[in-house]
Image: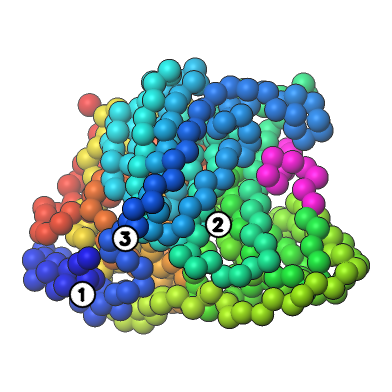
């Protein structure tokens, strides 16, 4: 396995075209691996996407699109070092792909139609195979017409366990999603409505946890549980409130934090994951976990019931002790690229969401990179939200760290793959891409993405040309 330092030295000498900062890049060394380390074990899963009916919400049959007949789809679990093989078949009435959100996969496995693979036609199959490089909580979903396909129910978790998982008494997963149901209690079949496009995407009228509105977790005092949260909604932001529980954040977007963090007001935007370490104390009580994103309205999410019985106290050190660079010199470095986020009238949907004045003109044509980065070279990217709406910006194939919000330096103590940018806000991030390829960057409010808020970041080995001006002109 090639070491990070060797690779960084190589890149530092090769790249003259932009200011490289070897010190900042070196600070990342060892934070997470450059290469996968397959141990020879292959875990094979068969997944079929198809329209089906599930008993849901109030028990009535709900027509959905599902992976293997359930919403959420199956949770795929493997250990770090194992190879995942997914034999996927598309029985939907549309083409599709699977994207492995947050996983550093070989580019050809990233599931971006026309860019990393041809879309999988109805009736066709495709084999996804890769060895994850990082342990953590990831998820998978289609990358074709995602505002419709994800909303109809296509998503599932991919959990990569540590080689030696910490001895939690339980590993619990909660997927938060919302549904916009019509008076007939079926999914409103008009997707990308002007209201959804012009605001913060589709916000539903029913919130579910693991596809249910009555999720209840029974625990025993003394237990220590790992709770993995995912927001799979198209647009809704959640702020989970576990009032009355001793909950610490141990991982964000898959990767462990530098140290356990108190769960305060954490905005879980579409795509974000949060791993919580919860020490259960005080038997004989029941708690409501709620979403307090909106100050005006508290949404109950699930119930936790603590038994009277006192179980054995599980004591072990928190797994949250990752190497996360401080990058204190980061804000003295020039901005590598500033992305401007905005909207305008026009385009096939009547409104276009733009990055640097360009709307992604459909996967079929637009593959010019909006930005070229060098593998192993530290970069500072700035997002300026010129609109009043929310944009959770997601990068494929790399983790980044937030450096500043509105020019005020922050040290979050963890990496992300998705960061929420509020109306008018500007956010600076730092990153060192370690995986070469054509990686998508987009807003994870899926209606915004469908209306153009997507671009490609090309990560190249060795010196490359400057970022071409072309973002995505129409042919
Ligand atoms: Cu979950 Cu391209 O995203
Ligand atoms: Cu992704
Ligand atoms: Cu957006």
Decide whether residue 207 is among the magenta residues.
yes
For the N terminus, the quadrant is bottom left
Q: On the picture, is 438 further left or further right than 407?
A: left
Which residue reaches farthest front? 40
347 versus 224 height, above or below? above
Q: Which of 437 and 468 is in front in this view?
A: 437
Name the element at disc 3. loop
Q: Can residue 447 be seen in this view?
A: no
Is label 3 or label 2 in front?
A: 3
398 versus 324 height, above or below? above
Magenta stretch in the rendered image = 205-216
Which residue is identified by label 3? 37
Name the element at disc 1. helix
Pointer 3 or 1: first along the chain: 1
In space, the residues marked 2 and 1 are separated at their CA atoms by 30 Å
Which residue is identified by label 2? 273
For the C terminus, the quadrant is top left
**Residue 357 screen position, x and y as percent:** 33, 43
Asked if the beta carbon under badge 3 is closer than 8 A to the nearest atom of ligand 2, the reply is: no
Pointer 3 or 2: first along the chain: 3
In space, the residues marked 3 and 2 are separated at their CA atoms by 24 Å
224 versus 470 height, above or below? below
Pointer 2 or 1: first along the chain: 1
Return the mark for residue 451: none
Say which residue appears at 26% left-offset and 29% top-offset.
365
Is label 2 or label 1 in front?
A: 1
**Residue 118 screen position, x and y as percent:** 30, 28
**Image-quadrant location for residue 90:** top left
Q: Nearer the viewer, residue 273 or 37?
A: 37
Is label 3 or label 1 in front?
A: 3
Which residue is identified by label 1? 5
Say which residue appears at 58% left-offset and 27% top-offset.
65
């Amino acid at each position: 396995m090639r070491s990070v330092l060797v690779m960084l030295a190589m890149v530092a000498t090769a790249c003259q075209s932009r200011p490289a900062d070897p010190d900042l890049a070196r600070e990342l060394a060892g934070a997470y691996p450059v290469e996968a380390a397959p141990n020879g074990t292959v875990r094979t899963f068969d997944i079929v996407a198809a329209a089906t009916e599930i008993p849901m919400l109030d028990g009535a049959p709900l027509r959905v699109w599902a992976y293997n007949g359930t919403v959420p789809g199956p949770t795929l679990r493997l250990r770090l070092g194992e190879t995942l093989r997914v034999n996927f078949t598309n029985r939907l009435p549309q083409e599709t792909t699977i994207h492995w959100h947050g996983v550093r996969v070989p580019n050809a496995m990233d599931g971006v139609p026309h860019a990393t693979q041809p879309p999988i036609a109805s009736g066709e199959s495709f084999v996804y195979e890769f060895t994850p490089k990082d342990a953590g909580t990831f998820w998978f979903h289609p990358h074709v017409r995602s505002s419709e396909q994800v909303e109809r129910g296509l998503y599932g978790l991919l959990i990569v366990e540590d080689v030696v998982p910490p001895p939690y008494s339980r590993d619990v997963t909660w997927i938060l999603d919302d549904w916009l149901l019509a008076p007939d209690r079926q999914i409103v079949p008009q997707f990308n409505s002007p209201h959804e496009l012009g605001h913060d995407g589709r916000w539903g009228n029913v919130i579910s946890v693991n596809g249910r509105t009555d999720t209840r977790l029974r625990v025993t005092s003394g237990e220590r549980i790992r709770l993995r949260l995912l927001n799979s909604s198209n647009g809704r932001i959640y702020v989970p409130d576990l009032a009355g529980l001793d909950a610490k954040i141990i991982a964000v977007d898959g990767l462990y934090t530098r140290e356990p963090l108190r769960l305060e007001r954490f905005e879980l935007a579409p795509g974000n994951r949060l791993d919580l370490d919860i020490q259960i104390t005080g038997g004989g009580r029941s708690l409501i976990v709620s979403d307090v994103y909106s100050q005006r309205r508290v949404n109950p999410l699930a119930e936790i019931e603590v038994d009277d019985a006192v179980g054995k106290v599980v004591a072990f050190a928190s797994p949250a002790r990752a190497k996360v660079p401080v990058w204190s010199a980061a804000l003295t470095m020039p901005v590598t690229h500033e992305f401007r986020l905005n909207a305008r009238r026009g385009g096939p949907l009547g409104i276009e969401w733009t990055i640097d004045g360009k709307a992604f003109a459909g996967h079929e044509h637009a593959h010019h990179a909006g930005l070229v980065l060098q593998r192993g070279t530290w970069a500072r990217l700035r997002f300026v939200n010129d609109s009043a709406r929310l944009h959770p910006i997601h990068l494929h194939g790399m983790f980044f760290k937030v450096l500043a919000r509105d020019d005020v330096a922050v040290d979050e103590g963890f990496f992300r793959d998705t960061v929420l940018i509020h109306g008018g806000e500007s956010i600076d991030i730092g990153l060192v891409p370690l995986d070469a390829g054509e990686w998508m960057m987009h807003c994870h409010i899926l209606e915004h993405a469908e209306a153009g808020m997507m671009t490609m970041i090309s990560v190249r080995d060795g010196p490359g040309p400057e970022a071409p001006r072309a973002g995505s002109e129409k042919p």
